Amino acid sequence: MTDPSLLVLASLADSDKHGYAMMEDIQRFAGVRLGPGTLYGAITRLEQRGWIAPVVSRLASEDRRRPYRLTAAGRRSLEADLARLNQVVRTGLRRLREA
């Protein structure tokens, strides 16, 4: 599982995070280190699709970090992607047992 968009959505599933926090979280749960270009490219694409959104904060002007949150559309997309991935995993494991 190394698709940057899927990893970003999964990272945001439990809480809002800024880019560096997402990078650290993804490293921790997936063992994948996304470079800044890859991470921010995925963030841009996800924001354009409406699957994530910046968190509006009155402190935003004081802090350069820009946290993002998962939108309802992003949650639906993540759930669908994970269901498909789960089907692939179940099929692969079953086939390994049968081999």
Image (tube, rainbow, N blue to C red):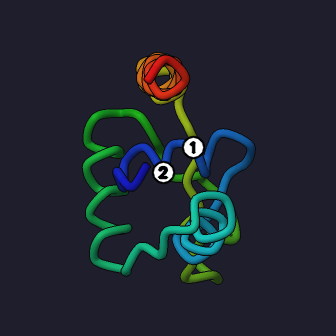
Q: Nearer the viewer, residue 40 or 94?
A: 94
Task: Kindly identify which numbered label has been placed on residue 38.
Answer: none
Q: Where's residue 66, x and y in %?
A: 54, 68
As drawn, is 43 to the left or to the right of 27? left
| Residue closest to the eye, 80 or 57 | 80
Q: Nearer the viewer, residue 97 or 45?
A: 97
Which quarter of the picture shows residue 62?
bottom right
The furthest residue to the front: 99
Q: Specify the farthest residue to the right.
A: 14
- Which residue is disc 1 drawn over? 10
Residue at 48%, 75% in the rendered image: 33
Residue pictured at 63% horizontal, 81% vertical: 63
Quarter of the image that includes the C terminus = top left
Q: Residue 42 appears in which quarter of the rendering?
A: bottom left
Residue 77 in view of the camera: no
Look at 50% across and 43% down and name the residue there: 9
Measured as percent of width and height from the top left, residue 67 is found at 59, 62
Q: Position of residue 10 (x, y in %)?
A: 57, 43
Instruction: Classify 10 Å Cα crowding around label 2: few (below 14), some (14-19), many (20 and above).
Output: many
Q: The residue under label 1 is which amino acid type?
A: Ala
Q: Is residue 89 above or below residue 65?
A: above
The residue that appears at 66% across and 65% down in the rendered structure is: 25
Name the element at disc 2. Answer: helix
- Using the numbered discs, state the Cα–Cα distance from disc 2 to disc 1 in whole angstroms: 5 Å
* Disc 2 to disc 1: CB gap under 8 Å: yes
Q: Are there few (<14), some (14-19), or many (20+) residues within 10 Å of tag 1?
A: many
Please state which amino acid type lies under the numbered disc 2: Leu
Determine whether, in the image, residue 32 is placed left or right of residue 47. Answer: right
Q: Tell me the residue that label 2 is attached to.
A: 7
